[in-house]
Amino acid sequence: MNFACKAAAFAIFAMLGVARCFAQETCAHRGDLDNAYCDENKDLVADRPRDAKKLKDPSTLVFAYTPIEDPAVYQNLFKPFQEHLANCTGKKVAYFTVQSNAAQIEAMRAGRLHVAGYASGQTGFAVNLAGAVPFAIKGNEKGPRTYTQVVIVKKGSPYYKLADLKGKKVAHTSPSSNSGNMAPRALFPAEGLVPDKDYKVLYSGKHDQSLMGVVNGDYDAAPITSDIYERFVNRGIIKDGDLRIIYRSGRFPTSSFAHAHDLGPALAERLKNCFFDFRFSAEMKKEFLGDDRFLPVSYQDDWALVRKVAEDSGTGFNQSGFEKERAAEEAARSKR
């Protein structure tokens, strides 16, 4: 690698880790993936590196869950799973606490994160920019977990349909969020409400911050995932009667669990089996609304609707879209 390429890689390492300088030597098909990855089998996710020297078999597996809420909540919740994963793989497992969606994607891109749970909307960025390979989703004996995008308002407010929110304070979560931003941009116009035209989009940063912002009167309304709403009711943080839902979308897949594309094949296969063999603790089952296991998932098939919503909303799972995410997260943090 020449000096200019090394300098370029060093300059952006904090943001993207190893970048285009390290793209695979040849690639017949890449699709929407970043130049660092290849998709010659056209399944929309990064192929495993052909060079065996680039395959990883770390002694410690680093795991993280989407920072959709306070990361500390999930660090404690996933402890039984971490113990299972360590026993099952024979490796140490470390929980990596991330404070933002962008940081989580950057960590896998840079090789610091081996397996992670990504929010539905962030999954596309993780696949295209970080080489994430989704393989599991939460669920139970009836099938995988799905959710709807809901719009919440205070119970006593005068808003009963989306068109009533014209000129009001409406909080989206972040640019890469499916239910918190992309779905509203794609679906609201048909209901008589156009984001950034009929109201100025205000980014809160996270679903829980949008929800509590409505409860506290900071926002008139907010589109969020139904899972977060239900979890806050179950925890007793809010009462079911405190808010009203004035809109509910069709169903989307919930968080994906993905491994880095460059894990050795034996480790990747063992990792999947460990996920599918695990049964959730009582605390996990309660928190995840009755889900008690991980089920197989296909990014190509199961994320088709999410990709269409992103396309219809004008959001690309690419570097430009990722920069919008980073900027919105920084703006939300500066307001806290």
Image: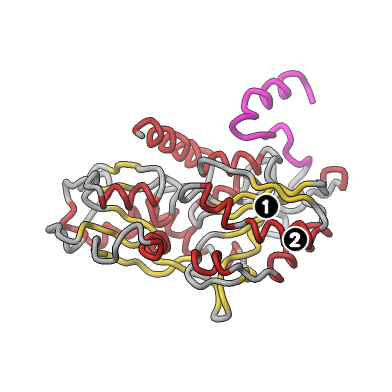
* Picture quadrant where residue 110 is located: top right
- The stretch of residues the image draws in magenta is 1-25
* Quarter the C terminus occupies: top left
Judged from the image, the secondary structure of the residue bearing numbered disc 1 is strand
* Direction from residue 94 to residue 292 in the image, left or right: left
* Picture quadrant where residue 274 is located: bottom right
* Direction from residue 15 to residue 219 in the image, left or right: left
Q: Which residue is mark 2?
A: 271
For the residues marked 1 and 2, what is the alpha-carbon distance in whole angstroms? 9 Å
Judged from the image, the secondary structure of the residue bearing numbered disc 2 is helix
Q: Which residue is mark 1?
A: 115
Colouring scheme, one of rainbow, by chain, secondary structure, one colour: secondary structure
Q: Residue at x 46, y 50 (%)?
A: 69
* Direction from residue 114 to residue 181 in the image, left or right: left
Confirm whether residue 238 shows in the render.
Answer: yes
* Picture quadrant where residue 268 is located: bottom right
Residues tagged 1 and 2 counted as in contact (Cβ below 8 A): yes
* Direction from residue 274 to residue 258 in the image, left or right: left
The x and y percentages for residue 192 are: 20, 59
The x and y percentages for residue 254 are: 50, 63
* Quarter the N terminus occupies: top right
Q: Residue at x 50, y 73 (%)?
A: 290
Looking at the rendered structure, the kind of residue marked 1 is Val
The x and y percentages for residue 175 are: 42, 45
